[in-house]
Image: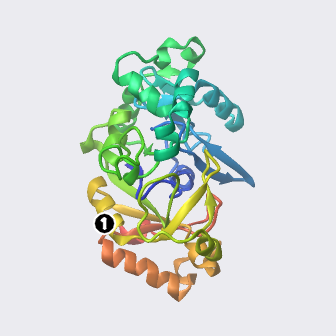
Amino acid sequence: MTTTVIVGGFFGDEGKGKVVSYLALKDNVKIAVRTGSVNAGHTVNWNGKTYKLRIIPSAFMNEDSRLLIGAGANINVNIFFKEIRETGTEKRVGIDEQASIIEEKHILEDRGNSYLSKTIGTTGQGVGPAIAERVRRKAKLARDIPELNPYLTDVAGEVNEAIEKGENVILEGTQGTFLSLYHGTYPYVTGRDTTAAAICSEVGVGPTKIDDVLIVFKSYVTRVGAGPLPGELSLEEAERRGWLEKATVTGRIRRAAPFNYELARKAIMINGATQIALTKIDIVFPECKGIKDYDKLSLNAKKFIEEIENKLKIPVTMIGTGPEAENIIDLRREKI
């Protein structure tokens, strides 16, 4: 039984929600914890329906999984209740009583700050101002909101107890390594650290209790908002390649570039990654769509995967071949 951190390797939008949803079903995850905030959306395709989640953990489709929101998270109460209704998870969700609250004033401040909205490219969800108020020790916490009382819990306590019992636990990060406030492309970053160590910190799990850090890379790189993107393609070229995407939260067009080995190496180093989940191989190699057997992948796709392993020195253990949660080639038994 394992405790696994799921972290984004580039600028977010790597497909972490898909990976978490697959693991929840395949590994019978006992507890899944979401970190971060509502400025990051995770998309899950399950049973013919698409869920775009911004606070509920992507493991929700496993009805035996306890779904928790860590103390380091920032919660928009309206979005929280909306997603509970959409996922039917009211009886399985818990919020750490010290998670902080995004208020309407934070959203207005975020959207009214021209530097953040126009220069940095913030999502305008109020996250930065809410974090700033928390740092000033003036924030409302989940324990201060009466309607959240039925969901309050000690997330660190629950998670550590499950780990001690040998249960499968997933810590679900948001965004990507290079949007980290500390390790990203400052100032074009988010308002918090997004690395594996920070994910553990937001939940309340010590580093010695982590078995694996699964870093998620998309088969190409995308980025929303301003900031550097090495090798960036023109909008026309991205569309020609089928790499043109829209962001889950804002609907903005994602800028695109080919897979970047230099960034990937650095992300692996910073996160202490032990495995790679490579998503959207079917977009770069359309002939691979829906395949669930590695041997049936095209020769070019296999060469790409082998090149990633040779250059990055850790195994590619999961390969995403389509949008559905179960469109995964799982090589963990063969490679670890």
Percent across and percent down for residue 58 are 56, 45
Residue farthest toward the right in the current orientation of the protein: 48
Percent across and percent down for residue 21 are 57, 51
Tell me what residue is drawn at x 56 percent, y 33 percent.
111
Q: Amino acid at mark 1?
A: Arg
Q: Tell me the quarter of the image containing the C terminus.
A: bottom left
Percent across and percent down for residue 73 are 45, 32
Percent across and percent down for residue 335 are 37, 70
Please state which of residues 98 and 132 is positioned toward the viewer in this rendering.
132
In the image, is residue 3 above or below residue 290?
A: above
Q: Please tell me in which quadrant of the rendered image residue 276 appears.
A: bottom left
Residue farthest toward the left in the current orientation of the protein: 208
Residue 212 can be seen in this image: yes
Residue farthest toward the bottom in the current orientation of the protein: 299
Along the horizontal axis of the image, is 83 left or right of 328? right
User: Could you classify mark 1 by the number of other residues whose Cα lies within 10 Å: few (under 14), some (14-19), or many (20 or more)?
Assistant: some
Tell me what residue is drawn at x 34 percent, y 48 percent.
186
Which residue was labeled with disc 1? Answer: 265
Q: Please tell me in which quadrant of the rendered image residue 286 appears.
A: bottom right
